[in-house]
Image: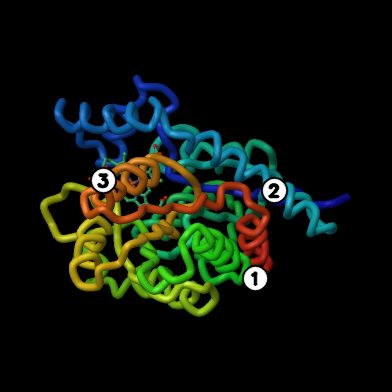
Amino acid sequence: MTKTIGLLVMAYGTPYQESDIEAYYTDIRHGKKPTDEELKDLKDRYQFIGGLSPLANTTQKQGEALCDALNQDYDDVEFKLYIGLKHIHPFIEDAVQSMHEDGIDEAVTVVLAPHYSSFSVGAYNTRAQKEADKFGITLKHVEHYYQQPKFIQYWTEKINETLTEIPKDEHDKTVLVVSAHSLPKGLIEKNNDPYPNELKHTAELLEQHSDIIHVAEGWQSEGNTGTPWLGPDVQDLTKSLFNEHGYKHYIYTPVGFVCEHLEVLYDNDYECKVVCDALGVHYYRPAMPNTDPLFIGAIVDEIKNVY
Ligand code: FEC
């Protein structure tokens, strides 16, 4: 009989309906309720992208695609999918409890975020581990997969496809903006966190593998905590790249995310585009990985390193 192994796919989570937004936002802020103005601002952003985010649906599809791919590759075990979310149900703890109820005693965990920070992937893993310890479930954690050849190949292909939309003699006037979600700078520096170096390494790999000539790294979607966050912010970066180099074409690759959701559809497709429009330059944002087989394959390959 083949053994069943849990596949715990963890992701950020998103409101399922408008009435979930306040509780979701409160959870993101560690229990501190948003003011009416902050809540309205977030509701307006969801409204702008069509009412709700596609994230919930995509997370489910990514989990299923990953589970199917693993079951095709491994013939000695059967993976069973559990989705655990950071800020809304089913929470990470709910997923671990379901594994226990199903008699699972061993699982692989993966976060739908390619770079490791102890404040993102590390925090998901700690929550899963704490709950798993209560039931004696053994977990093997994937920490990152941005460096996997198939992940780099996915983005390389997207960058090269985008370059075909730009006249060849303007490739030297084109810049790739490689970004991830910003995090508070003090925490990252104090803990010598690998996150900034992992983004830098991603940008280097994309520069090496794709046909892009100019590459810049930036951070996006920073929060409002009154303390400094990792920068430069992608909008400021766009302005300084224009002022210093006069680039005409800006290709945004938010490689710290793995699908279209609020932070991409609003922070890139609206906010960065507004800056590009004001500067009179061209905005491009290739499709996110979603369930692309190269992306799913990259995670499978990383799982093979841990299980
Ligand atoms: O589509 C959607 O509905 C949800 C999109 C979404 C993703 C996402 C990913 C990350 N976040 C990370 C860190 C922070 C920190 C704060 C913070 C705040 C928000 C807010 C919303 C939100 N995040 Fe998020 N994040 C998404 C959505 N995030 C909404 C609240 C309003 C706002 O500030 O814009 C600040 C918390 C605080 O105030 O104390 C920190 C990181 C990621 C990428 C890794 C991951 O996916 O876990 C890091 C998707």
Nearest the camera: 151 or 190? 151
Q: Secondary structure at mark 2?
A: helix
Residue drawn at point x = 66 percent, y = 50 percent: 66
Return the x and y of residue 8 as percentages of the image width and height. 59, 48
136 lies above or below 42: below
The circle drawn on residue 67 is 2
- Residue bearing mark 1: 305
Residue drawn at point x = 25 percent, y = 41 percent: 29
Return the x and y of residue 164 as percentages of the image width and height. 53, 61
Return the disc, 2 or 3, that comes first in the chain's sequence. Answer: 2
Q: Amino acid at mark 1?
A: Asn
Return the x and y of residue 20 as percentages of the image width and height. 36, 24
Tell me: is circle 3 under 8 Å from ligand 1: no
112 lies above or below 118: above
Q: Amino acid at mark 3?
A: Val
- Does the residue at mark 1 contact the one at mark 3 (Cβ under 8 Å)? no
Q: Secondary structure at mark 3?
A: helix
Q: Is residue 135 rendered to the left or right of residue 34?
A: right
The circle drawn on residue 274 is 3
Return the x and y of residue 16 as percentages of the image width and height. 44, 26
Residue drawn at point x = 20 percent, y = 59 percent: 236
